[in-house]
Amino acid sequence: MRNLAIGMNLLIVLLVLGSCGPNARDKALHSVFVSVNAARDGFLAYDLKHQQDLIDASPTPEAKEAVITAYRVTQAHIVELFDAAYRAIAAAAILKDGHSMPEVITAAALLKQALEDLTAKPAPAKPVAP
């Protein structure tokens, strides 16, 4: 969870460094790459534990399957946001134009928000057995 928080805080740094000259731009791009990697590592650790917690809190095999299926929709969305962030970083590194850096900032901001939303959700209530 700590890595996830560090990664999200580093993404904030990128948002501040959005309007940079060429050298600062490369440094900002490197910073966001490191930040997204840290957020990814934090998410992977969180994701594994969170899925296990969901399973442990579910009383029946059917409830376990339902809660994991529902969570995996959110998980897939976050994986897509990581993919978009990495693609934006790659494009900005290759193109070195004035248009690609705002896309990196947007992708990073969307990822940051999704990770904050995920970790802000209260733990699911334990289902009541019939």
Image (cartoon, helix red, strand yellow):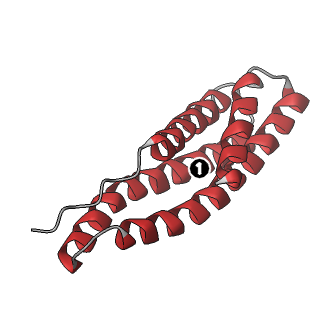
Q: Is residue 118 above or below residue 126?
A: above
Q: Extreme right residue here? A: 23
The x, y position of residue 47, in whole percent, is 51, 63
The C terminus sits in image quarter: bottom left
Task: Decide which of 54, 130 is in the foreground and name it.
Answer: 130
Q: Is residue 42 above or below residue 63?
A: above
The x, y position of residue 18, in whole percent, is 72, 24
Callout 1 amino acid: Arg
The N terminus sits in image quarter: bottom right
The residue that disc 1 covers is 87
Q: Residue at x 87, y 29 (%)?
A: 24
Q: Residue at x 38, y 65 (%)?
A: 54
Q: Quadrant of residue 3?
A: bottom right
Does 41 sit left or right of 48 as displayed?
right
Task: Decide which of 2, 84 is in the foreground and name it.
Answer: 2
The x, y position of residue 122, in whole percent, is 41, 45
The x, y position of residue 84, in whole percent, is 53, 47
Q: Residue at x 46, y 46 (%)?
A: 118
Task: Decide which of 110, 44 is in the foreground and name it.
Answer: 44
Does 58 sit left or right of 34 as displayed?
left
Q: Extreme front residue here? A: 129
Q: Quadrant of residue 19?
A: top right
Q: Residue at x 86, y 37 (%)?
A: 27
* Number of marks in the rendered image: 1
Q: Extreme bottom residue here? A: 61
- Label 1 element class: helix
Q: Extreme top residue here? A: 19
* Pointer 1 local density, CA inside 10 Å: few below 14, some 14–19, many at least 20: some
Task: Decide which of 16, 46 is in the foreground and name it.
Answer: 46
